[in-house]
Image: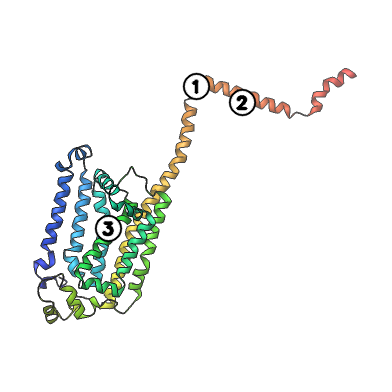
Amino acid sequence: MLGLEYFKFADVWSPVFLAFMLLITAGYFVLIGPGGGKWAAEERVPAGRKLLFAAGMALLYLAQGGPVELLGHMMFSFHMISMALSYLVAPPLLMLGIPPWVWRKVAVFLAGSPLRQLRFLVKPVAAAVVFNGLFSFYHIPAVHDYVMLHFGVHRLYYIVLFIASGLMWWTLVNPLPERPGAQGLKKMGFIFLNMVLLTPACGLIIFTKEPLYATYSDPNVWARAMGYCVSGNPAMLLSQFGGPQFFGFLEPGIDQQVGGILMKFIQEFIFASMLAYVFYQWYKQENRGGDDEELAVQLAGAHEPSGGREQSEVREHTEVRGQSEAREPSKTREKPEARVIQ
């Protein structure tokens, strides 16, 4: 099964990370339940929100600690699937799963802390540039290989990238409904901007036929990187498997191109779906305004008293008659005077 059978249970499923994610999930349910106090009682969390949060946590675990994470160290295509799940799928699910009253408390806390100096990062353009810039910078071959070979840098970079993805998704999700956010054309422009900014990095990966990353093409570099996610001596990996090609069913160059295509396809699918939804909402709202005005005029006419309508008709008839007489030629008014002179 893609080579996972050669590794221990702990290497594939990361029990420590699983326990950490389960602890956070349990804390979430305690917070929205008895631990939330009067706020949780006033704003009960529907089952849909709970399901979204649980789904987000499950996908994040699979991408960062489960089988997808291990496969991402052996095949670049799975690495890109892991990135897509971690930063394009899981964050909006988690943000939508957290009730608004929790976000209000977080916003109050941040407003009173030194982190308020970084509030400009929530602005749409800044958030889009920061996230897509960090993502593209990470996939520069030299940067990617360095991060993969240094565990501390790897974890720190992934945390920063996750926070940046949350800032980017804030504009699209807007978990605080009382706070004004981008709507209509502005939100559509923001979605389009994100679709464009990620294109250069994916394009470089897709259209380069030669392997760019030593992590997936050089057996020695691959073994060192694998040493951070599996137990045992990395040298044993070389003697047992020879390199990442043992697990891949594609050549490294083709696997790299497939990874770029998968990343771009997932991003385009998510953002194009959101773009269609936002456009539909904007179009419906624009047309609803005109329909409301027409309906108001009809209702006003329907509720006008009959006596008022009769008076209005008489007034209109009088005005039309007066205008007709004013346009009558002057000679018709002079005829009676001519008969007297004769």
Q: Is residue 237 above or below residue 155?
A: below
Dot 3 falls on a residue whose secondary structure is helix
Q: Tell me the crowding category of disc 2: few under 14, some 14 to 19, or many 20 or more residues within 10 angstroms, Cα based.
A: few
The numbered mark, 2 or 3, whose residue comes first in the sequence reads 3
Q: Is residue 157 above or below residue 183?
A: below
Q: Is residue 293 above or below residue 282?
A: above
Dot 1 falls on a residue whose secondary structure is loop
> Comparing marks 2 and 3, which lies closer to the viewer?
3
Quadrant in which residue 105 is drawn: top left
The residue positioned 25% from the left and 78% from the top of the image is 214
Q: Which mark is drawn over residue 316?
A: 2
Instruction: Give the distance between the C-alpha atoms of the residues marked 1 and 2, in whole angstroms.
Output: 17 Å
Dot 2 falls on a residue whose secondary structure is helix
Q: Which mark is drawn over residue 163?
A: 3
Q: Which mark is drawn over residue 305?
A: 1
Q: Amino acid at mark 2?
A: Glu
x, y (%) of residue 2? 17, 71
